Every structure is written in structure tokens, then in C-alpha cells.
Image (cartoon, coloured by chain):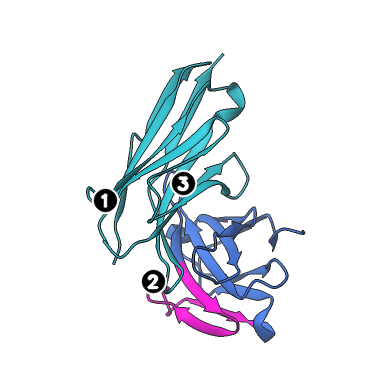
């Protein structure tokens, strides 16, 4: 099955700086890559996603890039704010079965 | 739209007892998932339903875990008997089930087994 690795496991940045989280996947059939943000005591919430036919997608301060050849994708958060502090999970999905495989998470702390 | 509803939010039981969790997905979502999230880890799939049929239950410990999806809508996950290592957050998620349909998660049930 699919194996998703995520780095780093913890990340601290100063408010206003950028944060980058990287994930790699093993199954070349994976074609959909969502990112989730999980705040304490809540379930993961979708923040951005990308399909395999797209190299980059941006939504305000958040962007995701995908390199299919290298089988890795990254989350970029610019101008970080304290409310960005949370655990972020990447996931990979093989569209036919809608099965999702998650990374191990990155705990992001934005220092005011 | 209303989100995925789960209950209870918290449950504390002793080992060897039984426990059940309930999930109501977003209306119209054909696919329903149960995930186990151990502290500090990513969600791990336990079972996936498409309508009221099981798509994948390969990682469900069937000697103690069971799940059903009633009439293709609500779902219950049961653990009997519980072990200490079952302490985790149990997340329910749903999706439309189409290609590139994202998961929508509930807030989970935090289970503590003592």
C-alpha cells in the first residue's frame, strides 16, 4: 500500500516568517494530495488540496507544490500568524478507491 | 451545511469493557470512514464504507472491533473487549465518494482505557 512520510515533525517560526512542510509518497498511482490542519480537541480540517495534473496551487497565504517525478509535495505558509499554530497532516489518495493515507503530522508553532 | 457529528466526545472505560461510538456523516456523502488517531500520530484507517457496504476493513482488528453503517447513513464503531492500547481518538470522516473528493472529519471521540 501507499506510504506517506512527512517532515519535519515539529517546526517553530517567528510570526511573519514562512513555514514549509514536506511529504513524500511511494505509490505512483496516487493522484490527489490534500493537506489538513488539526487544532487541539478538533478533527482535521481541509486547508488546501492538489491534483496530480497540477504542479502548484495557491490560496491566499497557503500554497502547495507537487513534483510527481520525485513523488513529493510541500505545503508553504507565508506571513505566518499565531493562529496558524496547529498540527498539519499531508495525505495521498489513489482516486479510484478514495482511500487516503496520512503522514505523521507536523506540529507548527508560530512565535509572536 | 452541517458537519460530521460524533458522540460521545469523551469516554473512559476499564480494560475488558465494551464501548460504542456513533457517527452521522454529512448529508449525501456516500463514503464513510473510521480512523484511529493515537497521540502524536496521523490518522490510521480502520474501516471504509461505500453506502452500506464495506470497501476496506483490512486494518480493523476484527477480534475486538466491529462497525456497521445503518441504511447507508449513520455508523457505529464498537470495541469489545477494550485493551489499554485502544486509548486513542476515534475520528469519523465522510466524503462524496467521487474522484478527488476530500474527507470531512468530525471532532472525534477521545477514548481512555484504564
Image: B16 above or below A18: below
- Which of the chains is cyan? A
Chain name for mark 3 = B
Query: Can you give x and y, in whole percent of width and height, for residue A10 in the image?
Result: 39, 31
Q: Nearer the viewer, residue A84 or A27?
A: A27
Query: Can you give x and y, in whole percent of width and height, for residue B27 in the image?
Result: 73, 70
The reply to whether residue B74 is in sight is: yes
Categorize mark 1 by other alpha carbons within 10 Å: few (<14), some (14-19), many (20+): some
Left or right: where B85 falls relative to B31: left
Residue of label 2: B59
- Span of residues in magenta: B46-69
Image point 43% across, 22% down: which residue? A12
* Dot 3 or dot 2, earlier in sequence: 3
Image: B57 above or below A50: below
Q: Nearer the viewer, residue B80 or B96?
A: B96
Marks 3 and 2, Cα distance to the nearest angstrom? 18 Å
Residue of label 3: B39
Marks 2 and 1, Cα distance to the nearest angstrom? 25 Å
Image: A19 above or below B99: above
- Which of the chains is blue? B
Query: Can you give x and y, in whole percent of width and height, for residue A110 in the image?
Result: 52, 21
Categorize mark 3 by other alpha carbons within 10 Å: few (<14), some (14-19), many (20+): few
Residue of label 1: A71
Chain name for mark 1 = A
The secondary structure type at the circle numbered 3 is loop
The secondary structure type at the circle numbered 2 is loop
Query: Can you give x and y, in whole percent of width and height, for residue B54 in the image?
Result: 50, 82
Q: Nearer the viewer, mark 2 or mark 1?
A: 1
The secondary structure type at the circle numbered 1 is loop
Image point 55% across, 43% down: which residue? A38
Marks 3 and 1, Cα distance to the nearest angstrom? 27 Å
Amino acid at each position: 500500500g501507499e506510504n506517506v512520510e512527512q517532515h519535519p515533525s515539529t517546526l517553530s517560526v517567528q510570526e511573519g516568517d514562512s513555514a514549509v512542510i514536506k511529504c513524500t509518497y511511494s505509490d505512483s498511482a496516487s493522484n490527489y494530495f490534500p493537506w489538513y490542519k488539526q487544532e487541539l480537541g478538533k478533527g482535521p480540517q481541509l486547508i488546501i488540496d492538489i491534483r496530480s495534473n497540477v504542479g502548484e496551487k495557491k490560496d491566499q497565504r497557503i500554497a502547495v507544490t507537487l513534483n510527481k517525478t520525485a513523488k513529493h509535495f510541500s505545503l508553504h505558509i507565508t506571513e505566518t500568524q499565531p493562529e496558524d499554530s496547529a498540527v498539519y497532516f499531508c495525505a495521498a489518495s489513489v482516486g479510484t478507491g478514495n482511500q487516503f493515507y496520512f503522514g505523521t503530522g507536523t506540529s507548527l508553532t508560530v512565535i509572536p | 451545511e452541517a458537519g460530521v457529528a460524533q458522540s460521545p466526545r469523551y469516554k473512559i472505560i476499564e480494560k475488558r469493557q465494551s464501548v460504542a461510538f456513533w457517527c452521522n456523516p454529512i448529508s449525501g456523502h456516500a463514503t464513510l470512514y473510521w480512523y484511529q488517531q493515537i497521540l502524536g500520530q496521523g490518522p490510521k484507517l480502520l474501516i471504509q464504507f461505500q453506502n452500506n457496504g464495506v470497501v476496506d476493513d483490512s486494518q480493523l482488528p476484527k477480534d475486538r472491533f466491529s462497525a456497521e453503517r445503518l441504511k447507508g447513513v449513520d455508523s457505529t464503531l464498537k470495541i469489545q473487549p477494550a485493551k489499554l492500547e485502544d486509548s486513542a481518538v476515534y475520528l469519523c470522516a465522510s466524503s462524496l465518494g467521487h474522484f478527488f473528493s476530500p474527507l470531512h472529519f468530525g471532532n472525534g471521540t477521545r477514548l481512555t482505557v484504564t
